[in-house]
């Protein structure tokens, strides 16, 4: 297989993938992150920020609420509660150690902080612009659209919510922007504002990433998804390890092995759309909950479609619940449609789920794992060649998975220790999950 060492990926495409996945959390916030990024861009330009500052501003706007998933309350309530600053700190903890997003961690940390409580003014100038953009997006959403061009109304609203929070220079810059009717007309039209944002980023701010950098971002994404539940805290790490090792042993190119590892990290990204009470529920899911759970790979496919440079990523990552008999979900693909990469990921998912230790049980022993895998082959669910390769080298794969998941556990423990006070006990309070009825 040919190695294309020049494969480079648009940073914006990767950030859009994350932004779209965060938006899945609630219909009320669909497009929120792009809206904040758009408003921040317009304010930043008004303030004559440098290209580098604009880039930081826009890209952090695209993911600013990434820490919002860690609450047992209704997400819409958390989002409306403008005093909830914990999610900003959680976002900071998720990003701080991972290049190339580490530089954005500090901006996220203070995106709800009052200006006068801010220590490092240079970084926090950008946080403060995100804060004002978020306030503006909030006002636009709750406003009757007929009032959009009534200046006094907007000015009063902005002042009411910005009082003591926003730096004067930023606010003054915003007020001159506010003079332009076109700003408000652009901002309130989804299609127009997203087109403006898209064109501006692609022409002026985008960067190219190599696969190693995308892998590092994938690791952050896997934490966002897996850390919500102690049962699955290192799940994606296990899958990324097994799927990339299988690909290597099946003579995939170095580049494809890397893509397979990335697919492992991203495979459950659509789970951001599944509510915490479903993710963390003990016992059987109701029909509605199960339907919500099953939608996750559909959304994984849809958000990964942003990364156009690596079309196989969405197929390998998002088909892991399809089965060879065509009875999996959500696309009902069968063996004539499921490529080998997707088959590797499906086997890796089952193998990891069976062998990993979970807080309520130890991983299954080899005999049991082999039996279940072969039964699934027998039932025409998963690929026999891949399963037999895995069984032939069982100890090698299992030891590697175990080692990598143990390392990943340290990341989880560190995250938990850093954030335990900020989080609504979703880590260990597993006997008291909020039931759908009072969610
Ligand atoms: Fe926020
Ligand atoms: Fe926000
Ligand atoms: Fe899954």
Image (tube, rainbow, N blue to C red):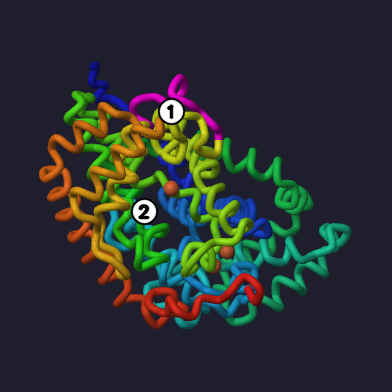
Q: Is residue 120 left or right of residue 204?
A: left
Q: Give me the residue at 74% from left, 52% from top.
A: 188
Cβ(mark 1) to ligand 3 < 8 Å? no
Q: Residue furthest right?
A: 146
- The image shows residue 285, relative to residue 110, as above or below, that is above
State which quarter of the image contains the C terminus.
bottom right
Q: Any mark on residue 311, and which?
A: 1
Residue at x 47% of width, y 69% of height: 282
Whether residue 40 is visible: no
Residue at (57% x, 80% y) in the render: 83
Q: Name the residue: 40% across, 30% down.
A: 380
Q: Determine the secondary structure under disc 2.
A: helix
- Magenta region: which residues? 331-342
Q: Rate crowding at label 2 as few (under 14), some (14 to 19) or many (20 or more) other CA atoms within 10 Å.
A: many
Please rate how many residues cluster around mark 1, counting C-alpha atoms within 10 Å: few if below 14, some from 14 to 19, many from 20. few
Q: CA distance from mark 2 to mark 1?
A: 20 Å
Is 158 drawn above or below residue 338 in the view shown?
A: below
Residue 423 percent location from the top left of the image: 44, 77
Say whether residue 83 is left or right of residue 2: right
Residue designated by label 2: 222
Depth order, front residue of 282/433:
282
**Image quadrant containing the N terminus:** top left
Is residue 214 or residue 358 the one in the foreground?
358
Residue 195 % position (x, y): 64, 38
Per the image, is 22 magenta? no
């Amino acid at each position: 297989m040919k190695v294309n060492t020049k494969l480079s990926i648009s940073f914006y495409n990767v950030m859009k993938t994350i932004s779209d996945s965060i938006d899945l959390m609630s219909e009320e916030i669909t497009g929120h992150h792009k809206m904040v990024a758009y408003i921040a861009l317009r304010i930043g330009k008004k303030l004559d920020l440098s290209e580098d500052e604009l880039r930081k501003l826009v890209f952090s706007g695209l993911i600013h609420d990434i820490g919002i998933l860690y609450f047992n309350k209704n997400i819409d309530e958390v989002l409306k509660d403008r005093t909830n600053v914990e999610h900003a700190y959680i976002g900071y903890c998720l990003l701080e150690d991972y290049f190339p997003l580490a530089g954005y961690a500090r901006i996220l940390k203070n995106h709800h902080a009052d200006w006068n409580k801010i220590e490092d003014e240079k970084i926090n100038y950008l946080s403060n612009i995100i804060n004002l953009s978020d306030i503006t997006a909030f006002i636009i959403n709750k406003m009757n659209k007929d009032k959009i061009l009534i200046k006094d109304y907007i000015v009063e609203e902005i002042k009411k919510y910005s009082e003591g929070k926003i730096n004067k220079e930023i606010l003054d810059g915003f007020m001159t922007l506010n003079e332009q009717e076109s700003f408000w007309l652009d901002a309130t039209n989804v299609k127009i504002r997203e087109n403006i944002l898209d064109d501006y980023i692609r022409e002026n701010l985008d960067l190219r990433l190599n696969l190693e950098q995308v892998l590092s971002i994938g690791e952050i994404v896997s934490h966002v998804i897996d850390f919500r539940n102690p049962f699955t805290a290192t799940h994606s790490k296990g899958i990324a390890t097994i799927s990339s090792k299988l690909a290597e042993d099946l003579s995939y190119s170095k580049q494809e092995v890397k893509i397979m590892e990335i697919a492992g990290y991203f495979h459950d990204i659509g789970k951001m759309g599944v509510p915490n009470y479903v993710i963390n529920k003990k016992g059987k899911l109701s029909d509605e909950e199960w339907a919500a759970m099953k939608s996750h790979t559909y959304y994984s496919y849809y958000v990964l479609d942003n990364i156009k440079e690596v079309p196989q990523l969405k197929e390998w990552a998002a088909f892991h619940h399809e089965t060879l008999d065509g009875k999996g979900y959500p696309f009902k693909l069968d063996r004539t449609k499921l490529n080998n990469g997707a088959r590797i990921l499906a086997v890796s998912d089952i193998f990891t789920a069976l062998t990993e230790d979970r807080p309520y049980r130890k991983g299954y022993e080899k005999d049991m794992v082999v039996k279940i895998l072969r039964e699934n082959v027998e039932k025409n669910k998963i690929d026999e060649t891949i399963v037999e390769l895995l069984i032939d080298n069982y100890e090698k794969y299992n030891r590697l998975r175990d080692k990598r998941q143990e390392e990943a556990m340290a990341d989880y423990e560190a995250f938990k220790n850093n954030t335990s006070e900020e989080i609504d006990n979703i880590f260990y309070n597993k006997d008291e999950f909020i039931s759908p009825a009072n969610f």
